[in-house]
Each structure stands twice: as C-alpha cells, then as structure tokens.
Amino acid sequence: MGKWFGSSGIRGDYNVISPEFALKLGMAVGKTFSLEKPVFIASDIRATGDIQKSCFMSGYSSYSGDIIDIGLCPTPILSYMSNISETLGIMVTASHNPQGHNGFKLFWRGGECNEEKEAKIEQHMESLELEETFLEKNVTSWKSVGMNSSIESSRIIDHFVNFLNEKIDIKNFNSKIVLDCANNVPNLVSPLSLEKLGFKNVILMNKDLDSTFPGRPSEPTLDNLQELIERVITEKADLGVAHDGDGDRFTIVDETGHLIEATTLINFFLDNLDYSDPTKKIVYLTSDCTSEGKKIAKKHGAIVKISRIGRNREHVNEEGVIFLAEPNKLIFPELGNWIDGLYPVLKLLEIRNNRKISEIMLNYENRKTLRLAFNISTNDKQELHDHIKKLPFLWADLIETSTSLDGLKLYFTDNSNVLIRLSGTEPKVKFYIESDTNDHNLKLITLIQEELNLTGEGVGC
C-alpha cells in the first residue's frame, strides 16, 4: 500500500482528504492517464461529495481531457459505465467510513486500478507538493483544457438495472424482503431493481438520502443492523438485506433474524456456481476466507488461488476465472469485473426459490468465524506491527505454521487459525479467526488481546 492508496482506494477525514487534496489528486490522475476520450465521475450522498468532485474535475481537466459527472449513484454503476465505455471512472466515496470522511476509488475499464497505476499517481502528487506555487501556474494552454459536463443519472440507473435484471432468472417473487439502504445511494438502485423484477412485498428502511446517516452507520455489521434484525422478525419476512454506503457490499439476515456470515455466503455461492464450462475453473479467494470454501470449490473441480485482501481485482481479467471472493466483496465475471452489492442478492433470491434462508445456509457454516477490529493510534502502529511479527516465535509451541501473504496468518495445532492485519483504510488492527466452535474463537481473541495489550471491545468487520 502507498501513502494515500489503501486496499480499497483513498479514504480519510475531510481535514486530510480536503478540497485541495482533491484538486491535486485530479491533476495527478490526469497526468497519469492523459486520455483523449471522456472519463466519468460520480459520488454518493456524503456532504463533502460535491466540493470534492468539483475540485477533482478541475484538477483532472487541467491536465487531461473531458470529464463527465454522472451524479449520485452507487459505485457499481460507475464501474459499469467505466467498463462499457472502456475508460476511466472516479467514484467519490468513503464507503462505510464515518460521515466526516470522504475518499476516491478509481476504475479502469470497470475494474479497480492496479497498484502500479496507484503508485504512479502518488508519484505525481508528490511532485506537485514540491511545487509550492503550482496552484498559480497554468499547466496547459487554454486550448488543451478539458471540458467538464454532466448527464442525468436516472437514465444511467435505468439502463444499469435493466442490464442487471436481464442476467437473473427468478421464478418465485413471493419473498417478503426488508431492505436497508443506509440513507445513501443504494436507495436509487436496489428498490427499483426488485420492483422491476416483480417483487411486491419489499419493506424499505433508511430510504431517504441523508448525508448525516441518521438511520445507522454505513458499515452493515451486526452491531449496526439491530433495527433491521428486529424488523425482519416483526414483519415475519423471508430475509433482510443491508447495503453499505456506496452499494458495492451487502449483508443478509435470514428469516430468524440471524445475520449470515460473509464467509458462509461465499461458501454458498462457491457451491452454486455454474462449473459446466471446462475453460472456466479458476476461483480466487482472499486469505481471510475459510478453509471450508476451498474444499467446496475443489469438490467442483475448481482451481483455488489465494489473493491478498483488496487485490482480487488484479486477477479479474485472467483467463479461466469464474469467481473472485473476499468477505463482503464478491466479483462475478459473468456480470463484470467489479464488486457489486446487488447482483449477489439477486442470485441468492434466484437460487433460493421457495426455501428458507436459514436452512440453506446451515450447509455452509460448519466452520465458525469471528471477525473483529480494534482501534489503534498512529503512535502505537509500528510497535504493534513489530509485536505481531514476533508471534510465531512467542507462540511456537501452539503454532503449526504461518504465512505472511497478507499481514500474518497463524495456523494452530488445534486446527484453528487467525489472520492478523493492519487495516489499509482505517487506523485499526483486524483479526479474522476460524475454528470449529464459537467458544474457541472467543478464547483465541482473548489470548490475542492480552498478548498485544489491546484495550476496549472490538467491533465486527
């Protein structure tokens, strides 16, 4: 990861990811790509979205060509526009971060930009910082300045919903669904998609666009979804669906009010992919997926490859890839080369038919998982990093093996494992634990907390 780009774009507090930052970033992106064709930019409902977008557009067009604002929309629509137009897309969003944060995600021909491009952009940003008076300079002649324009987002949204729905073959539209779109841009797409498909019994929560996120925080975790869970039970719904702020992630609550683990959903999809094409057998999973997922994929004859967290995107265009999964972030190449938070929900409804979600998912959660994040200070980050690296030696009698592809993953002699990594987007340390029982997971996180001197309660991640 670079100075600004983490595992999922750029995010941070508005004091840091400021209008001046947006202007510099736009200039650096324009200098990096120098495209002759127009590029697209969009944003979610965050209060600073408009000013960040305007500053980026000014910076970009001063160095490169035309940029078109497609307005408010979820990230998958921006990815889709980037893909069909074979151009660059810029999404102004901080995804599930707090209200006062904002950020940028860059897409090239649908997929997120790779590390090489991100590093080049950061190099250009550093050079701009060295030029103290760069804001006073005209970087191109007036004849070379790109044009800023906008188009109506509703037409694009309709087009995307039709594109999405055409790929789904749902037979039963009787499901009662509680849909929570987090007071953000998923409200523009998910209700419309379900309505056009034919679902008549959809109950909307947090349906008003509001940059203060009055309904709940953007991240769809267990702690943040208690009202959704209660509503599913009260309404006797078949399932609940929750999106994150920019609509590329989702969470499912079954009819009993149980939140389905992200890894369980991955295992479910791995067992229900169409493996009939012998030329498409490769599955990419990140290092925080469960061992159960690997077994399911291999049962179907798939070749399983492991990617770093946040970097599945760099393998999406490889020949033979049928599915790429990271908890809460799924890519179906049959749809496109981007993470989408609605398509998997529609696929689940297609496969479900008339069965209970709870009964379906029982088959895919034999291994129990615990995912927790703890806040850390910048001052403690290096010391914590050094301590984590020592764990294979400090716990040598408990550990069978370890890997360092993504942070540190420890495989214990009792068939449990934990992945420990510092977040690429927030000041947090994250733990992804897997074992045969929930009790064992709790014992393991307690052991880790004591060893690393972590105080406070962790939050789901």
Image: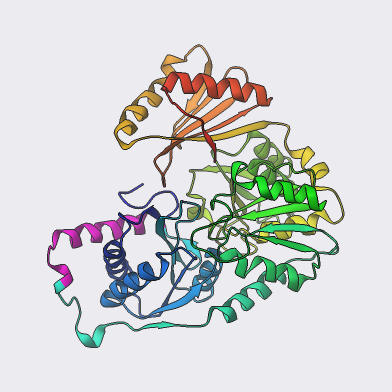
Name the side, left or right, on which 116 lies relative to 402. left
Please state if 240 lies on the left or on the right of 220 as rendered: right
Q: Is residue 443 above or below residue 255?
A: above
Residue furthest bottom in the image: 143
**Residue located 23% across and 88% down the image:** 143
Q: Residue furthest top?
A: 397
- The residue closer to the viewer here, 31 or 439, is 439
Q: Quadrant of residue 306?
A: top right
Whether residue 237 is visible, yes or no, is no
- Tell me where residue 27 appears, x and y as whole percent: 27, 69
What is the magenta range? 114-135
Specify whether residue 285 is in view: yes
Q: Is residue 40 above or below residue 178?
A: below
> What's the image's color scheme?
rainbow
Point 75% across, 44% down: residue: 257
Q: Quadrant of the C terminus?
A: top right
Residue 269 drawn above or below residue 31: above
